[in-house]
């Protein structure tokens, strides 16, 4: 189980904490909570406090659930289903 607390993503720029920073920015190579999806694709993603996060992050989560994948800042697909 990979647990992501969306309640701590209260600002629009916190999307980098979820999907990563673009190449060349500070924190680009840091490990993200969603990288566990890449290593164990059969796991369960538990999203907590989604109602407390910024609307842009909620939209990113809704898009990922609709399309079936997150795309991190490096362009890598992290599949969800």
Image: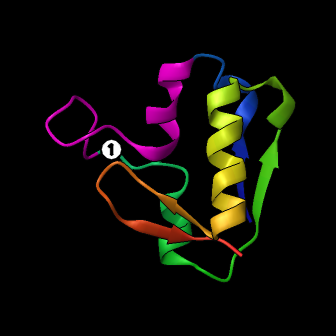
- Percent position of residue 8, x then y: 67, 24
12 versus 66 height, above or below: above
Local crowd size for mark 1, using a 10 Å CA cut-off: few (<14), some (14–19), many (≥20):
few
Mark 1, residue position: 30
Element under disc 1 = loop
**Is residue 41 shown left or right of residue 2?**
left
The chosen color scheme is rainbow
Quadrant for the N terminus in the image? bottom right
Seen from the viewer's position, the closer of residues 17 and 55 is 55
Look at the image and say whether residue 24 sits in the magenta stretch: yes
- Percent position of residue 12, x then y: 55, 20
> Dividing the picture into quarters, in which one does residue 81 lie?
bottom right
Q: How many marks?
A: 1
Seen from the viewer's position, the closer of residues 8 and 54 is 54
Residue depicted at x 76% and y 70%:
44
> Dividing the picture into quarters, in which one does residue 36 lie?
bottom right
Look at the image and say whether residue 70 sits in the magenta stretch: no
- Percent position of residue 28, x then y: 26, 41
**Is residue 36 shown left or right of residue 27?**
right
Residue depicted at x 81% and y 24%:
52
Residue depicted at x 13% and y 36%:
24
19 versus 50 height, above or below: below
Residue depicted at x 34% and y 48%:
73
- In the image, the segment drawn in magenta is 12-29
44 versus 30 height, above or below: below
- Percent position of residue 4, x then y: 69, 46
Farthest residue, direction left: 24
**Is residue 29 shown left or right of residue 7?**
left
Farthest residue, direction top: 11
């Amino acid at each position: 189980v990979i647990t992501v607390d969306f309640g701590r993503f209260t600002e629009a720029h916190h999307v980098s904490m979820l999907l990563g920073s673009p190449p060349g920015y500070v924190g680009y190579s840091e490990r993200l909570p969603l990288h566990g999806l890449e290593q164990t694709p059969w796991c369960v993603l538990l999203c907590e406090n989604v109602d407390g996060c910024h609307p842009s992050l909620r939209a990113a989560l809704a898009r990922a659930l609709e399309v079936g994948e997150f795309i991190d800042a490096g362009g890598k697909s992290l599949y969800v289903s």
